[in-house]
Amino acid sequence: MTDLPQLDLSADVLALTRALVDAPSVSGSEEPLADAVEAALRALAGLEVERVGNSVLARTNLGRPTRVVLAGHLDTVPVAGNLPSELREVDGVQRLYGCGTSDMKAGDAVMLRLAGRFGVPGGEPAHDLTFVFYDNEEVEAVKNGLGRVARERRGWLYGDLAILLEPTDGEIEGGCQGTLRVRLETTGRRAHSARSWLGVNAVHGLAGALATLAAYRPREVEIDGLTYREGLNAVGISGGVAGNVIPDEAALTVNFRYAPDRDEDAAEAHVREVFAEALAGGATLTVTDNAGGAMPGLAEPAAAAFVAAVGRPPRAKLGWTDVARFAAFGIPAVNYGPGDPQLAHTRDEHVRVDRLRPAEDALTAYLSGSPA
């Protein structure tokens, strides 16, 4: 796994997916894979290519009246003993196992196949195309490579429609949830545990907040016919000094996944309201990350045309994706890719081989203006 592949864009989508998966690219270490992607795209005579950090941008300039942006991230979560990739048959279905297979190197492979098809003289897409392969999607928003592109090369992101090849199992997923992370901290007074009455236990001070979370009932919101379900959950807890010390500090990390009808300020206000009792009791709340969601926008003509071309009813995106960045620019954006989102970040992450070619074929038909 130490030698990066020479990416052959004429290879079938399974071989290309496997080559990408076997090139480890945990967030922050995408540079070698970005180098390989850049080299493969620069070999295509019909593309203008540019590098921004470890993001690789490529586009056609054919003078078409419309432009479609296709985007996907190159990074993965940390490897969980699931590399190199392994092809297995389970229940009569061929599946490719490995870190990043579903989220989202299968989608990246489809993008590269489309670049190889349309990024050459005579490729003749019905729209001008932009391809964006970016870094650091799986970590905090401030590091996101697409955010850097938006700041430094915003013009590269403009188009009539953006398609994020995030894992959707071949379904169109509209919009996305917002995500907010906060750190709720309590303080106490340190003491020897043999004389605990002399101290104030900061860990015990989190009990009320935990009970509040356990009793919390998330709302479900229907927007443009799509149902978004919110969630407010503890995702981490810390505290304690030693086995014989009453702790004087403790912290609870909470993640709020909120429907796109709330903006960032409304999401924070809601979480502060939920924890009002804890805050009144002296706890402090600090926002560590807050990325707003995106409304579905499927009524926009370009998005509606893509939905019609795929021919399947859309559903809500239950998670945050970079469709939110495009929506902030007023660009209709959808999620559509071959991986299963429920397998993302798992030790048994895999992609069904029979999902790869249909996703490529649907996008090829749409981008060439042919019937699906």
Image (cartoon, helix red, strand yellow):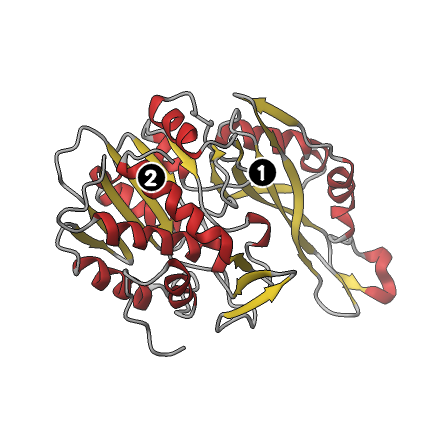
Q: Is residue 270 above or below residue 245?
A: above
Q: Residue 322's image quarter? A: top left
Look at the image and tell me whether residue 299 can be seen.
yes
- Residue 325, given in percent of the width and then of the height, sits at 37, 37
- Residue 311, given in percent of the width and then of the height, sits at 46, 31
Q: Within 10 Å of the Cα at label 1, are there few (<14), some (14-19), or many (20+) other Cα atoms?
A: many
Q: Which residue lies furthest to the bottom in this view?
A: 2
- Residue 315, given in percent of the width and then of the height, sits at 54, 32
Residue 208 is labelled as none
Determine the residue positioned at 73% across, 41% down: 209
Q: Is residue 138 above or below residue 15?
A: above
Q: How many labels does the image show?
A: 2
CA gap between label 2 and label 1 equals: 34 Å
- The residue pinned by badge 2 equals 365
The kind of residue on which mark 2 rests is: Ala
Nearest the viewer among 274 and 51 is 51
Nearest the viewer among 36 and 327 is 36
User: If the image is split into quadrants, where does the N terminus sit?
Assistant: bottom left
Q: Within 10 Å of the Cα at label 2, are there few (<14), some (14-19), or many (20+) other Cα atoms?
A: some
Q: Name which of mark 2 and mark 1 comes first in the sequence.
A: 1
The reply to whether discs 2 and 1 touch (Cβ–Cβ < 8 Å) is no
Helix, strand or loop under label 1: strand
- The residue pinned by badge 1 equals 257
